[in-house]
Amino acid sequence: MNELTDLTELRDLFADKPHPTADRLAPARTALLAEARTKRRPRARATGLRRLMLAGGLVAAMTVGAIAVQTFTPSAPASAAEVLRLAAAAATETPWPEPRDDQYLHYERIAETRAEKGVPNVGPRHITGEIWESVNGSRPELWWHKPSKSRPQDPEYKELLTRCPERGVGRPTYADLRGWPTDQEQLRHKLAKYGNELHRNKDAAAAVWSGGVNILGTPVPPKLQKAIFTIAATLPGIETEELKDATGKSGIAVTRVDNRGPGGAISRESLIFDKTSYVLLGGQELVPGLGRELWSMTRPQITDVLPAWSTSVKRRGCL
């Protein structure tokens, strides 16, 4: 990648246009990126994401990667819809191998919770976890919780967990998600239904956004990830900002504002993308009265079995 060359081409392309704005530059920017992707050999990247409850704290995760296409700067932000469309294209540029139902997805997740004003009992806590996730949910999953670099004093522990349907609404397995439609109308209906099961009394757009973000909480088949981003780009109330994920990496975020905080307080739920590749890095949720969550996740690897040392780990209940 040569960012200076890209920026020079973009500047020259619009040299004769008066008062360039983000809206006016967007179509040509998209065309330039599309041309760049066809002429460059894509680099390997890491992808993935997960939401769950751990020790009373909300934990979530997302994908990581590096395919160079364009630089985002606060002085010339792309629109939220454009960011999501570019993320949709990035999702399928370097897909991982398709796993069998009896295999595991192996990835690392980092999550962090922080207290906000008026939330004295939340965080801070930082969790680094290595996960072996059963593709179809039929085998116990292994979680290895490690002390983080920022908090080496935190305890390390390992646990085997099984899926318990009686616990209520749960996230679909990777095998389940392979059967989800990628047709826009069918998937929009599916996401809205799932979002309403998670959070009742939401309007249609909020339910679709909530359902999509939750589904993206662990590895998602690349074609489905692309379809979710494409739908999210059409939702009202989305905006861009610059945020850092749980690893501290700064990215361009697409944020949707909602009033589901305590007493109708405004909350902000964000997906964070790499500034140059638009690959999903992680996310953030900020809810007044509940604090802030940050999350990120590495690209999943596929394995047939758990590590040998897992035979000494006791089962500790349900996912």
Image: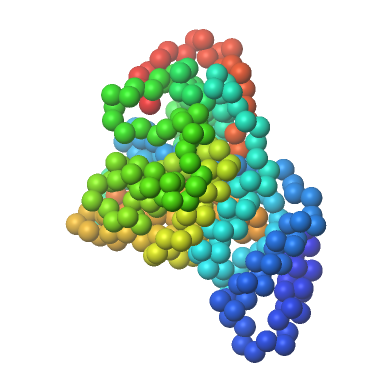
Pinpoint residue 228: horizontal percent, then vertical percent: 49, 49
Residue in view at x 69 percent, y 51 percent: 67
Residue in view at x 28 percent, y 59 percent: 259
Q: Is residue 61 left or right of residue 299?
A: left
Residue in view at x 60 percent, y 34 percent: 300
Q: Is residue 308 left or right of residue 234?
A: right
Pinpoint residue 210: horizontal percent, then vertical percent: 37, 49
Pinpoint residue 48: horizontal percent, then vertical percent: 55, 40
Does any portion of residue 199 appear in the rendered image? yes
Q: Residue furthest left?
A: 263
Image mark count: 0
Q: How is the model colour-coded? A: rainbow
The quadrant the N terminus occupies is bottom right
Residue in view at x 38 percent, y 26 percent: 319
Camera-side residue: 18 or 159?
18
Pinpoint residue 152: horizontal percent, then vertical percent: 51, 35
Is the residue 133 above or below the residue 110 in the image? above
Camera-side residue: 19 or 58?
19
Does any portion of residue 210 appear in the rendered image? no
Q: Is residue 26 left or right of residue 209?
A: right
Camera-side residue: 42 or 194?
194
Is the residue 35 above or below the residue 299 in the image? below
Residue 316 sits in quarter: top left
